[in-house]
Amino acid sequence: MTMQAAIFPGQGAQLVGMGRDVAEAHPVAAETFAQADEVLEFKLSKLCFEGPAERLNATDIQQPAIFTTSVALFRAGLDAGCFTADSFAAMGGLSLGEYTALHLAGALSFADALRLVARRGQLMQQACEASTGGMVSLLGLDEEQALKLCERVADKGNVRPANFNCPGQIVISGDKTACEAAVELAGEFKTRAIPLPVAGAFHSELMRPAAEGLRPELEQAAFQTTKTRVIANVDAEYHTDPAAIRDSLYRQVLNPVRWQACIERMVADGCDEFWEIGPNRHLTGMMRKINRKMKTINVSTAEGLAAVL
């Protein structure tokens, strides 16, 4: 018997025009964008549908935009009968996507989750502007090798793994000088190092101000125990009670996202069909490298929903 899991993308999945086709085809999706505009008190929908890319790519806009588009696609899928509220045995999301999973699993209302995501984006943007950080994707290294590379450039600044995405793809994050030194040293480690076009050093100690700013917001948010189990980025364990959710989301800002471990845990627990619901196809690509045997269904457009039907 097939056991399904829903997974949701994080920052970097945005693209101008996202959600527009599904909003035009499904009234419930259009209502989701309208609700987001009302909650945030600005036209997030216009930025998603029309851009400009420079504004949509900003951290403080990316996060609520990707969250809202993912929720709109999920609601459209429910309304169209692609799946039901009980279809998924587990949910997960990459960084920001964990908030999408928690909302759709019943831990937080749409309005509360959107406000929290928007505040998270603002705080992370501020932390980026207050520091000089960067991120580098390392191709072909395992965790031990990535840690050794970070140790070799420690005299240039603080840098460490931030994303364990899939086999052969680890992202390091930290002081820009250390990131630049890691790129220069990549040949010695027989790896290809690609500096990422990001605003700063996400999931690193440079995000400490954002984490501390987010802590009181998390404490005030009205979390509930999830109806569907949701896996946490920081340790690949399932969220339990509201206190554990708050602690995990606080730690997530500063600590590595262990996405590969999250997928492997869900597979070990019986999930054998994964639905990526949200803009773009990033998680589908990672899944092929983590476990090619798993069936992955991508729902990122109205056409994708129609194909499922």
Image (spheres, helix red, strand yellow):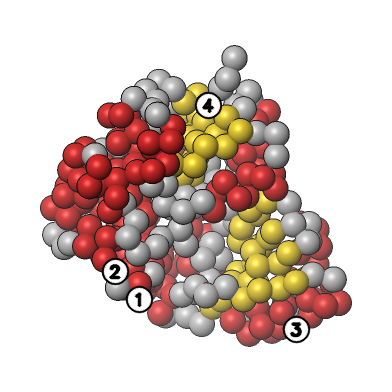
Q: Residues within 10 Å of mark 1 (few under 14, many from 20)?
A: few
Separation of disc 2 and disc 3 at Cα?
35 Å
For the C terminus, the quadrant is top left
Q: Which residue is mark 2?
A: 51
Does the residue at mark 1 contact the one at mark 2 (Cβ under 8 Å)? yes
Looking at the image, residue 265 lies above or below residue 167: above
Marking on residue 54: 1
Image spot of residue 195 (x, y percent): 62, 76
The image quarter in which residue 271 lies: top right
Q: Marks 2 and 3: which is nearer the front?
A: 2
Looking at the image, residue 283 lies above or below residue 275: below
Q: Which residue is mark 4?
A: 4
First in residue order: circle 3 vs circle 4: 4
Does the residue at mark 1 contact the one at mark 3 (Cβ under 8 Å)? no
Separation of disc 3 and disc 4 at Cα?
43 Å
Q: Marks 2 and 4: which is nearer the front?
A: 2
Image spot of residue 110 (x, y percent): 26, 41
Marking on residue 184: 3
Separation of disc 1 and disc 2 at Cα?
8 Å
Q: Secondary structure at mark 4?
A: strand
Identify which residue is drawn at 45% across, 58% down. Answer: 13
First in residue order: circle 2 vs circle 4: 4
Identify the amino acid type marked 4: Gln
Q: Residues within 10 Å of mark 4 (few under 14, many from 20)?
A: many
